[in-house]
Image (cartoon, grey):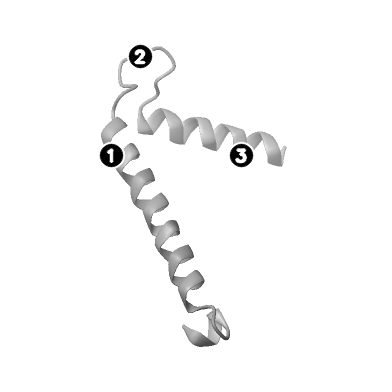
Amino acid sequence: MDRFAGPRGRSRYVAEAVAQRVRRDALGAAIRETAGAMVGKPGWMSPDEVARWVDELRAEGTE
């Protein structure tokens, strides 16, 4: 850690690492809490429909 943090930079390095982890954990919690919220709503696509849509977009780019 000291090699990356530099002289006297350990506290800031640790604080930034913790802040990054907190943001990641908060994002993960939000994703878990809202999973499936769009199922059955207008605009929702099943995983198979999304895969087909992506394949079609990719095919358009190669023509």
Point out which mark residue 58 bears: 3
Which of the two discs, 3 and 2, labels the residue nearer the N terminus? 2
Q: CA distance from mark 1 to mark 2?
A: 18 Å
Q: Position of residue 60 (x, y in %)?
A: 67, 34
Q: CA distance from mark 3 to mark 2?
A: 26 Å
Which of the two discs, 1 and 2, labels the residue nearer the N terminus? 1
- The part of the image, by quadrant, that contains residue 14 is bottom left
Point out which mark residue 32 bears: 1
Which of the two discs, 1 and 3, labels the residue nearer the N terminus? 1
For the point 36% across and 33% down, the residue is 47
Q: Nearer the viewer, residue 36 or 31?
A: 31
Q: What type is the residue that disc 3 sits on?
A: Arg
Position of residue 48 relative to residue 1, above or below, is: above
Q: CA distance from mark 1 to mark 3?
A: 29 Å
Q: What type is the residue that disc 1 sits on?
A: Arg
Q: Position of residue 5 (x, y in %)?
A: 54, 79
- Residue 23 visible somewhere in the drawing: yes
- Residue 35 visible somewhere in the drawing: no
Q: Nearer the viewer, residue 1 or 47?
A: 1
Q: What type is the residue that disc 2 sits on?
A: Lys
Q: Position of residue 50 (x, y in %)?
A: 44, 31
Point out which mark residue 41 bears: 2
For the point 34% across and 21% down, the residue is 38
